[in-house]
Amino acid sequence: MNKPNLPQHPCANKCTDFKGEQCKTCLVQQIEKRELELGVAPDEAYVKTDTSDFLPDDVVVKIFGDDDTLYVFAMQSEINPDYGYIGEPDAEQGECIALADIRHATVAEIQAKRRLTEAEQALAEVS
């Protein structure tokens, strides 16, 4: 007596689209799983958690303008994840700013207690 292979098929008794051969739904899932294992899946296939590079209490500076103040990152905006709230240390009030407009303060800036100019930053990196 010859046993068919169908009951051993991955879709058997699991997928309602199984009709004697692997269904398109399960086949696509297997292809996507294989792509993830090989690291060739499209970017949107990967689970993204927090898109912000900033954590609460990170010391940041504004990239643009002549403001040399060090700020503390408070939180990412819940309404628009491209924005966050920053404030001066121990300040009760803060401001909403685009995350693209701030960066982490360097060690030299934290030691100097202010944002350094590009020339000062270059000197700090050399020494």
Image (cartoon, rainbow, N blue to C red):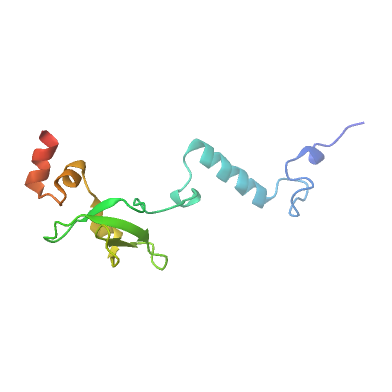
| Residue depicted at x 7% and y 45% | 119
Q: Is residue 58 above or below residue 36?
A: below
Query: Is 70 left, or right, of 39 in this rendering?
Result: left
Residue 75: x and y in percent read 37, 59
| Residue depicted at x 22% and y 48% | 105
Quadrant location, the N terminus: top right
Residue 64 or 91: which is nearer the viewer? Answer: 91
| Residue depicted at x 46% and y 48% | 42
Residue 51 or 21: which is nearer the viewer? Answer: 51
Q: Is residue 115 above or below residue 1?
A: below
Query: Is 15 left, or right, of 2 in this rendering?
Result: left
Residue 72: x and y in percent read 28, 55
Query: Is 57 left, or right, of 103 in this rendering?
Result: right
Residue 86: x and y in percent read 29, 61
Quadrant location, the C terminus: top left
Q: Is residue 38 above or below residue 67?
A: above
Query: Is 53 left, or right, of 35 in this rendering?
Result: left
Q: Residue furthest right?
A: 1
Residue 13 or 116: which is nearer the viewer? Answer: 116
